[in-house]
Image (cartoon, helix red, strand yellow):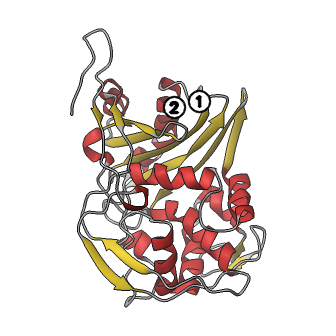
Amino acid sequence: MRTETGSRGPTVVRRPIARMRGGLAAVGALTVMVGTACSADGSEPEEVENSADVSQMGRGDVPTEERDDLETVFGEAGVEGTFVLHDADNGTSTVVGSESARERSVPGPTFELLNSLVALETGEVADVDEEIEHEGSGGARSLREALPDSDVAVQRELAERMGSRDLHTWVDRFDYGNRAMDDGNGNGQEWLEGPLEISPLEQTVFLAGLARAELPVQVEHQQALHEVVLREQEQERSLYATEGWNADADRSPGWWVGWVEGREGLHTFALRLEGAGQEQMELREPLGRELLDELDVFPS
């Protein structure tokens, strides 16, 4: 069903979406069995059936409101982008660039949120301050140091330690994007190179679980990430954010994702710019902040 406002207001389109499994839509499932991943306490979660969604479209299970008038934010900057703002309290989303909001692409370094949670939960790192030796420049960094910079080398090291097979289990438990991990590959690079993909709408649903500490890992591990990704506090509002872009991959999308918590409630967001150069990718946070301001969530 499609409804539009009158000429005095912005274009608004509402599309109710059918309820589906796990809060996310699954279109065309491929079923594979994966191994188990141990938690930090030594227990093993039940073996899960991984239902990898091999379709190209990902849909957050929420009604959406389109703001076509705000697409000028991207147009005036000379970039192609999508922005989703999810109201976690009433379960609705505002979408700028609706044609791409349900399309999936690799999460890139934004996968660090899930990857770090799993590393903490399984005991690969004791806490966010433990230094992690890796092959990248800098030698060793903690999650507290690496997460604000979206340090790919640190996250690659953790992913390789856990391996695709164990990560596959956790990706499925989190119902993350298309949940597609290549068990045979085993190098833990699927979040950078594919086949793991997630849509902007799905990013915001995952982030709502993290922001509320409702994901299926220990609450203290989620709260530790809150502390690390806190960017700014102003006028009784707190901004939490991280970004991601794989400069080494051809046409890799750039992300700026996070949430705002304050007197207006909890809002999660995901901005994605389509593949472009360094100059355009540096616009991710400024454009995201502009849209948060335009939508009266976080003043610029």
Q: Residues within 10 Å of mark 1 (few under 14, many from 20)?
A: many
Residue that mark 1 sits on: 298
Query: Helix, strand or loop at disc 1?
Result: loop
Query: What residue lies at 38% left-to-right and 29% top-to-bottom?
Result: 73
* 75 is higher (above) or lower (below) than 207: above
For residue 25, what is the image quadrant?
A: bottom left
Q: Is residue 7 left or right of residue 248?
A: left
Name the kind of residue labelled 1 in the image.
Phe
> Can you say which quadrant of the picture contains the C terminus?
top right
The residue wearing badge 2 is 292
Q: In this image, 174 relative to 154: left or right?
A: left
List x then y, in percent, for residue 105. Answer: 34, 60
Q: Residue at x 62, y 86 (%)?
A: 44
Q: At numbered mark 2, what does the secondary structure look like: helix, strand or loop?
A: helix
Amino acid carrying label 2: it is Leu
Image spot of residue 248 (x, y percent): 40, 67
Reading the chain from its start, which is encountered first: label 2 or label 1?
2
Residue 85: % across, % down: 46, 38
Q: Left or right of 130: which side holds 217?
A: left
Q: CA distance from mark 2 to mark 1?
A: 5 Å
Q: Is residue 243 visible?
A: no
Counting other residues with Cα less than 10 Å from the Cα at mark 2, is it few (<14), some (14-19), or many (20 or more)?
some
Q: Look at 47% across and 49% down and name the residue there.
A: 204
Report the front residue among 297 and 274. Answer: 297
Task: Judge whether residue 220 can be spotted in this image.
Answer: yes
